[in-house]
Amino acid sequence: MSELSDASGRVEIEYCTQCRWLPRAAWLAQELLTTFEAELTELALKPGKGGVFVVRVDDEVIWDRREQGFPEPTAVKKLVRDRVAPGKSLGHSER
């Protein structure tokens, strides 16, 4: 794990530039920043290649398209919430 465990809340979305998945990554980033505006310390979009679409929280992979398909925002929000804001209600997204 990171040495800066106090500084949790960094999300990285790595997306394939060859596949033109920037709009999908940017949309997911917007969803996360809107939901966790006080909890996230940083959200990075990382250009990649080879069909990559991976979401990481504090360098831990929480979603990989190759294994799980494309994520629904609600699924990613729950995984991010569990790491950066346990106990936070996601409101109508959480059913």
Image (cartoon, rainbow, N blue to C red):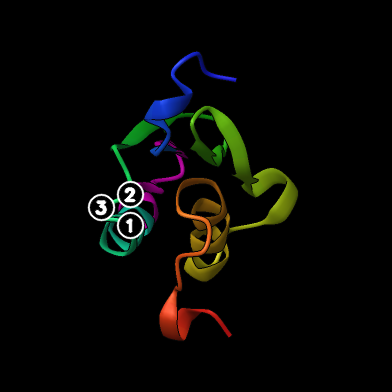
Q: Amino acid at mark 2?
A: Glu
The residue closer to the viewer here, 49 or 14, is: 14
Q: Is residue 29 magenta?
A: no
The circle drawn on residue 39 is: 2
Q: For the residues marked 1 and 2, what is the alpha-carbon distance in whole angstroms?
A: 5 Å
> Could you tell whether 36 is left or right of 74 in the image?
left
> Could you tell whether 83 is left or right of 88 in the image?
right
Q: For the N terminus, which image quadrant?
A: top right
Cβ–Cβ below 8 Å for labels 3 and 2? yes
When asked about the image quadrant of residue 42, the answer is: top left
Q: Secondary structure at mark 3?
A: loop
Q: Secondary structure at mark 2?
A: loop
Task: Give the residue displayed 57% in from the left and 39% down from the top.
Answer: 51
What x and y, as percent, mark residue 92? 44, 86
Q: Amino acid at mark 1?
A: Phe
> Could you tell whether 70 is left or right of 24 in the image?
right
Q: Amino acid at mark 3?
A: Ala
Q: For the residues marked 3 and 2, what is the alpha-carbon distance in whole angstroms?
A: 4 Å
Task: Give the residue displayed 49% in from the left and 56% down from the top.
Answer: 81
Q: For the residues marked 3 and 1, what is the alpha-carbon distance in whole angstroms?
A: 5 Å
Cβ–Cβ below 8 Å for labels 1 and 2? yes
Cβ–Cβ below 8 Å for labels 3 and 1? yes
Q: For the C terminus, which image quadrant?
A: bottom right
The circle drawn on residue 52 is: none
The circle drawn on residue 36 is: 1
The part of the chain drawn in magenta is 13-27
The circle drawn on residue 38 is: 3
Task: Give the residue displayed 52% in from the left and 18% down from the top.
Answer: 2
What x and y, as percent, mark residue 72? 54, 67
What x and y, as percent, mark residue 12? 42, 36
